[in-house]
Amino acid sequence: MKSLKSLLIITSHNKLGDTLNATGVWMEDLAAPYYILKDGGEYITLASPKGGQVPLDANSQSALAVTKNTQRFQQDAQAMYHFTHSLPINEMKAEDFDLVFLVGGYGAMWDFTDNKCLNLLLENFITQHKPVGLVGHAVVALISLKINNALLVKGKKITGFSNHEEQVAGLNEKPPFLLESKLNALGALYSCGPDTASYVMVDGNIVTGQNPASAKETARQTLLLAHNKAQLVQLY
């Protein structure tokens, strides 16, 4: 099986709304997919809206959030180099990759939303019949995406960070909107599993995961689609 070229996109946004609280990428949302791809022998490129060093949500390094994946990532010199030297997404082209995976974290609620450059990149991946994986708050990148002038999420089976998970985290009033509520308002067929449990939806070439616990399986399903690309050719 040939090695694939994978693009991981991470947030550049480091502030939780108009508060002074720092945010950014959630480490497990990055580390789990990174090693699904790396251990599968795939080539990985990390990109972000601004490029360069990306912000890390400190809460994702707490004792409750640390995993074998996050520990491995932070001890991996190559991985940390990618993390501190991400490329700007405006230099990325869908034709150069076999799949794209958008990494979660609260920062995505700001710079993945209505991002014209990101929208164009995702549109090109989809119309080129390539898989798009998204986990947690990164699913927000789909809300303004249109394919053939129609909202992509309408009628799509999608998951993402749930309203209840926001309430439990005590952050339901911090983001500009609640992801679950927005997806439902736009006509997505939203569903979710229990808090902190893995829950993944696959609809065509769109793979979405609910939360950090879903990151590994979301990446695995995205990679599986990429290796079976022929199944996707007639979707759009």
Image (tube, rainbow, N blue to C red):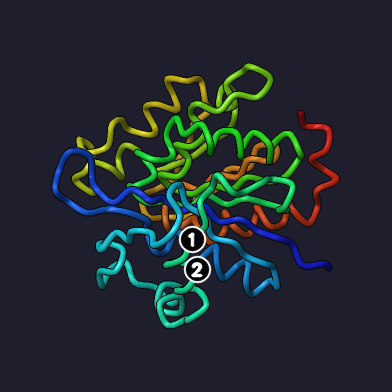
Q: Is residue 98 left or right of residue 143?
A: right
**Quarter occupied by residue 62:** bottom left
Residue 86: which disc?
A: 1
- The image shows residue 7, relative to residue 85, as above or below, that is above
The N terminus appears in which quarter of the rendering?
Answer: bottom right
On the image, the x and y values in percent for residue 139 come to 48, 40
On the image, the x and y values in percent for residue 138 come to 45, 44
- The image shows residue 152, relative to residue 58, as above or below, that is above
Q: Secondary structure at mark 1?
A: loop
- Per the model, the C-alpha gap separating discs 2 and 1 is 6 Å
**Quarter occupied by residue 235:** top right
On the image, the x and y values in percent for residue 220 come to 63, 59
Which amino acid does the dot numbered 2 rest on? His
Q: Secondary structure at mark 2?
A: helix
The C terminus appears in which quarter of the rendering?
Answer: top right
Q: Residues within 10 Å of mark 2 (few under 14, many from 20)?
A: some
**At x 79% / y 40%, what residue is drawn?**
232
**At x 42% / y 64%, what residue is drawn?**
28
Is there CB contact under 8 Å for labels 2 and 1?
Answer: yes
Is 130 or 202 nearer to us in this picture? 130
Q: Residues within 10 Å of mark 1 (few under 14, many from 20)?
A: many
**Quarter occupied by residue 26:** bottom left
- The image shows residue 147, relative to residue 121, as above or below, that is above
Q: Which residue is mark 2?
A: 82
Residue 65: which disc?
A: none
On the image, the x and y values in percent for residue 41 come to 70, 73
Which amino acid does the dot numbered 1 rest on? Ser
Q: Is residue 39 left or right of residue 230?
A: left
